């Protein structure tokens, strides 16, 4: 896959005003180029997205202009599919960016009062006469289940006989949230590079001092560094340590590090982090591993290097199964079968990433359940989507007396018609951290 030209976000986040221009341009392009096909695929003629201030439908933020940080009072977006494309309209007390004001001429062009918004929606439906009206209700995807109980009740009461045409917009919502423009994928590539740079800085003598720095110190340093760069984390960074002589905890078949977070990192430790950031309305999710060198060492023990190589091999086996048209559960089962054939002991728990960190789309396993994910795992993979390729392997380390290490990896990957491409640079070597003079 060939990415478009690198974006400035690879080095420094854009000023907020420029970010808003980019996001609004993307939204216009997505409404024009992506939404018609997604509505056709879902069999939806008209899509209603409803949210009240501070109780927004999760999909609403992806449709609002960049200067809108939340819904205003009740905001109703109406997206009608016609032969000419998709007409976006807003039934709102305030103008909503690219959306046409859906105000009744009978009101003299004035925005509807809150008590008349539902009547305005019904008027639009009677004029458009859609066969299938999509609303955001879903049993399998929380991100597609954003229509609140109260809004659903008031909507169905107002629509009268038109309520019989309401259907779940799950397929449309998931498609809208998971599908990326080429420009968005390029920005995600740059953001994944940026995460790697921050982690490498954290895993350097400038920040990590063996015998002094703790996992907690490193996690807070990473969070502060992201804030200083103008990048928002979507979860608090996680840093953990594995150490020879401190056996990991086994829970539901998984190994979990048990070195306390407030204990200083020491030479000979394996240090792992999990970091996710937000910029331009997009999320990343990355993990990296580093080794603290003992006195006289110039590289990590062969057992730890081998563990990373096994993890890379499980990545290869998983990406080989990331094929458009397969379900997440099918990818999981095939990759696990291939891993078992090679004697790899590991877990796969990859997920879509984009507008949300744990995004809408096919789930490919969970760390504590490798048998498949009902519902979300049954969803089919589509092109122009992005995933956090997240997994781990368990490998005994001879230098640690055969003690197993849990090598956890996570990389951004894009699935397009050209296949799978890594976003940022894939980790194939442990980061080396000087630990002693």
Image: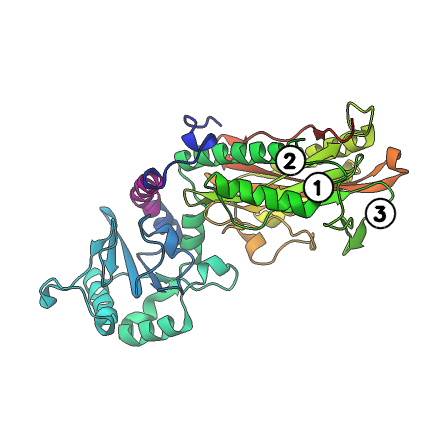
- Residue drawn at (45%, 41%), measured in percent from left and top? 230
Asked whether disc 1 touches disc 3, contact meaning CB atoms under 8 Å apart, the reply is no
Q: Which residues are magenta?
A: 19-36
| Residue at numbered disc 1 | 213
Q: Which residue is mark 2?
A: 207
How far is the residue under mark 1 from the one under mark 3? 21 Å
> Sequence-wise, which precedes: disc 1 or disc 3?
1
Is there CB contact under 8 Å for labels 2 and 3?
Answer: no
| Residue corresponding to mark 3 | 247
On residue 230, the disc is: none
Question: Is residue 326 something that shows in the picture?
Answer: no
**Mark 2 surroundings: few (<14), some (14-19) or many (≥20) residues within 10 A:** some
For marks 2 and 3 on the same chain, the one whose residue lies earlier in the sequence? 2
Measure how far apart labels 2 and 3 are at the Cα level.
27 Å
Report the front residue among 401 and 211. Answer: 211
**Left or right of residue 44, residue 379 in this image:** right
């Amino acid at each position: 896959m060939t990415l478009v030209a690198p974006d400035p976000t690879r080095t420094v986040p854009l000023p907020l005003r420029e970010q808003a221009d980019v996001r609004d341009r993307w939204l216009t392009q997505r409404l024009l180029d992506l939404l018609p096909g997604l509505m056709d695929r879902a069999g939806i003629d008209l899509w209603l997205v409803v949210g009240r201030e501070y109780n927004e439908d999760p999909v609403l933020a992806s449709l609002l202009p960049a200067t809108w940080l939340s819904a205003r009072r009740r905001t109703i977006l109406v997206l009608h599919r016609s032969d000419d494309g998709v007409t976006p309209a807003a039934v709102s007390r305030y103008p909503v960016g690219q959306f046409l004001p859906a105000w009744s001429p009978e009101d003299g062009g004035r925005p509807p009062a809150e008590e008349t918004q539902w009547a305005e929606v019904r008027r639009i439906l009677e004029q458009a006469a859609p066969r299938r009206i999509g609303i955001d209700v879903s049993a399998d995807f929380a991100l597609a289940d954003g229509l609140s109980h109260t809004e659903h009740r008031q909507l169905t009461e107002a629509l009268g006989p038109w309520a019989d045409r309401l259907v779940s917009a799950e397929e449309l919502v998931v498609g809208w949230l998971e599908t990326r423009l080429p420009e968005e994928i390029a920005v995600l590539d740059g953001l994944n590079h940026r995460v790697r740079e921050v982690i490498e800085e954290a895993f350097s003598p400038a920040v990590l001092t063996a015998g002094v720095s703790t996992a907690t110190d490193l996690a807070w340093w990473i969070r502060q560094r992201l804030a200083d760069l103008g990048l928002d984390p979507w979860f608090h960074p996680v840093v953990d340590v594995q150490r020879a002589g401190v056996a990991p905890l086994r829970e539901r078949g998984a190994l979990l590090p048990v070195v306390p977070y407030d204990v200083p990192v020491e030479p000979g430790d394996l240090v792992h982090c999990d970091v996710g950031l937000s910029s331009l309305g997009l999320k990343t999710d990355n993990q990296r591993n580093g080794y603290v060198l003992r006195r006289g060492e110039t590289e990590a023990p062969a057992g730890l290097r081998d563990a990373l190589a096994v993890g890379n091999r499980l990545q290869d086996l998983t990406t080989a199964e990331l094929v458009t048209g397969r379900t997440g559960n099918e990818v999981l089962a095939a990759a696990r079968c291939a891993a078992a054939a090679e004697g790899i002991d590991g877990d796969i728990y990859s997920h879509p990433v984009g507008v949300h960190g744990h995004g809408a789309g096919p789930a490919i396993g969970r760390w504590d359940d490798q048998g498949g994910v009902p519902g979300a795992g049954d969803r089919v993979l589509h092109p122009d989507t992005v995933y956090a390729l997240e997994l781990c392997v368990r490998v005994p380390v001879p230098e640690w007396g055969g003690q197993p290490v849990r090598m956890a990896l996570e990389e951004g990957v894009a699935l397009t018609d050209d296949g799978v491409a890594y976003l940022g640079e894939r980790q194939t070597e442990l980061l080396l951290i000087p630990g002693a003079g």
